[in-house]
Structure formats: C-alpha cells, structure tokens
Image (cartoon, helix red, strand yellow):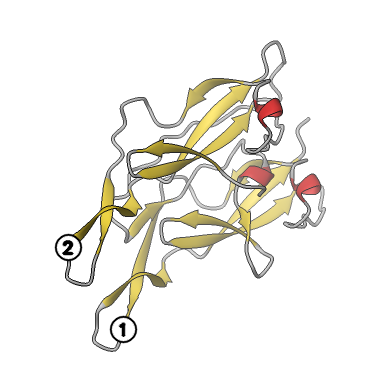
Amino acid sequence: MAGDRRDAYGDANVRIVFVSSDGTYLDPGNNEQLAEYVVTGQNLAPNTEIKLTYAKDPDGGEYSNLVDVANYNDIVLAVEKPGQSKAIDVNLTPILPSPDKYVRYVKDYVGMNVASAGYVSMAGDYRDYYGKGNVKLELVSDDGSYIDPSDIEMMSQYVVTGQSIEPNTEISMTFGTDSEGKEYDSLVATQSVQSITLNVAKPR
C-alpha cells in the first residue's frame, strides 16, 4: 500500500511480503517498526532457483540487464515480535514457479494483513500483480463492514481468513498483437482468473 520492500536477485528484484503472527500490518517503509520483528519462516526454501528471462531489442537480441519476467515475483516472510503470543496461524505455502510470462499461480493470502495483500489501482479498486497482469481482490468482511481500499487504517485492522481460489491454481494469459501479428511484450489481452474473493476478519 505505502510502497514495496524488495530484495535484489541479480538483475531482478523480488517483493518481500511480511506476515506477522499477531496480525499487525508491517509498513515496508517503517524501519523502526520492522526492527521489532524477527523472521521465523519463508514460503520459498533457501536455494530455490529464481529464473530470469531478459527483454529483447527490435532485432531479437537480449538486453544484458533488462529483465522481462522472473519465475517468482514474491517471497512471503513469517515474522513475529519476540515474546509476543500468536494471534493467527501464518501460512507459508510454496507457490509453484512460473514457466513463462503466460502462466502464473494464485498466491496464498490466508494470514496476511489485508493492507499487505495488494495495491490500490488507478480506478480505486484493490488488486495484486501476477506477472504482466493483475487480479482484482474482492474483500468480504465477517462483520459486514465495507472495507475501503484507500483507507489504510481500516485495511490494516483485518487479516485474510480464506480465499475463493486455491493457492497454486494456474492463471493463464494471452497477449495482444500489433497489426502485423507480433505479440506485445506486456499488453495482456486475456487471463483465466479476473478476481479472487478474500474473506477477512479482525484478529481475535
């Protein structure tokens, strides 16, 4: 919501998603807050291979450092404040690697603070990136409250308790073409999943 936390992997970088055992929203830009927590787990095992595909110039040659797509976009880190009791169970589901830009896999949102799950689009709805595409996140609260994606204080009060599409469900994409039939690098024409409903609740 307020900017991503990322880690460099060669010529690419991967978004770091913090999931706290007390349900707290961790602001990626707040180093003082982050310093209070320690990492207790991660959804991708150490030494998991991150494969990069590089963009090509008009002649078909690869650029030396311009990454077109990576097989992973996110790493989920489970974190907790030392000595503090757990309010939620943190899911650390390993997400399948994407073989190319045409396929992505649904993430596991359960346990995430809602404010960490996605971003507010220009149209004002809540979305999450999936490679070159994006998916709308529909928020349904257990108390019937309307959750305004632009209200980070309200969003940060809720955690995800369920999702309508199982983690690792395949999302397939096709890309638009120009007048000569050449495929655009990043203009998604169709994708098999348009939205995911997230059930959310305030931590008990």
Q: In this view of the protein, which residue sits in the foreground, 61 or 117? A: 61
The part of the image, by quadrant, that contains residue 150 is bottom right
Q: Is residue 99 left or right of residue 148?
A: left
Residue under label 1: 178
**CA distance for labels 2 and 1:** 20 Å
Residue at the image point whose x is 40% and y is 40% from the top: 95
Where in the figure is residue 61, as x and y percent of width and height?
17, 62
Instruction: Kindly check if marks 2 and 1 are in contact, taking CB atoms under 8 A apart as contact.
Output: no
Q: Is residue 129 left or right of residue 11?
A: right
How many discs appear?
2
Residue at the image point whose x is 51% and y is 52% from the top: 165
Q: In this view of the protein, which residue sits in the foreground, 146 or 151? A: 151
Q: Amino acid at mark 2?
A: Gly
- The label number, if any, that marks residue 61 in the structure image: 2
Q: From what the image shows, is residue 160 above or below residue 43?
A: below
Q: From what the image shows, is residue 19 above or below residue 71?
A: above
Is disc 1 surrounded by few (<14), some (14 to 19) or many (20+) residues within 10 Å? few
Name the secondary structure under disc 1: loop
Is disc 2 surrounded by few (<14), some (14 to 19) or many (20+) residues within 10 Å? few
